[in-house]
Image: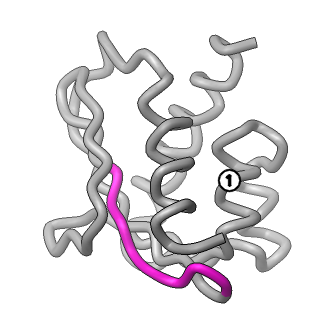
Amino acid sequence: MTYEEIFAKSKELILANDVEGLEGHIAVQVNITGEGEGAFYIELKDGKVYVEPYEYYDRDCIFIISAKNFLKICEGKLDAVVAFTTGKLKVEGSIEKALEFSKIVKKFQKNSK
């Protein structure tokens, strides 16, 4: 997959979820490694989600992960905490915000089933 395809698929999966009612702010930059290498960010802010194809310098944390594993997380086929503990996901920055983000992703997955 190219970076553009990975970004488009990630954005589609993320924007398909309802974040209305989520308060607060989390900004996660995703650095894709290997095939389709590149960076984009996901920002959850007061009930809205933004996914943009560039680096975000006011981020809470950075996820460093392959495209395959990131898409698995977005699809609910891989738990972010399991990915982290098995070395498939590296996190730089706030581990607390990364955990909060993973809980939101799990909520998305439960609501979409």
Residue at 25% x, 74% y is 55
Which residue is outermost to the bottom? 34
Quarter in which the C terminus is drawn: top right
Q: Residue at x 81, y 58 (%)?
A: 82
- Up the image or down, 41 lies above or below 75; here it is below
Quick check: 50 left or right of 58?
A: right
Based on the picture, tell me whether residue 62 belongs to the magenta stretch: no
Vertical relation: 4 (above or below) 97: below
Near-viewer residue (53 or 74): 53
Q: Position of residue 59 (x, y in %)?
A: 24, 65
Q: Which residue is at 46% across, 66% downward?
A: 4
Q: Residue under label 1, please give it.
A: 71
Q: Position of residue 7 (x, y in %)?
A: 47, 59
Q: Nearer the viewer, residue 84 or 14?
A: 14
Numbered label tally = 1
Q: Is residue 43 left or right of residue 3?
A: left
Label 1 sits on a secondary structure element that is helix
Q: Quadrant of the N terminus?
A: bottom right
Q: Is residue 58 above or below residue 73?
A: below
Asked if the magenta segment contains residue 37, the reply would be yes
Q: Position of residue 48 (x, y in %)?
A: 23, 26
Q: Position of residue 101 (x, y in %)?
A: 47, 45
* Disc 1: CA contacts within 10 A as few (<14), some (14-19) or many (>=20): some
Amino acid at circle 1: Leu
Locate residue 47: give its quadrant: top left
In the image, what residue occupies the spot 14% across and 67% down?
58
User: In this view of the protein, which residue sits in the foreground, 29 or 95?
Assistant: 29
Please give the range of residues in magenta: 35-42
Horizontal relation, residue 36 to residue 19: left or right: right
Which secondary structure dominates the residues rendered in magenta?
strand
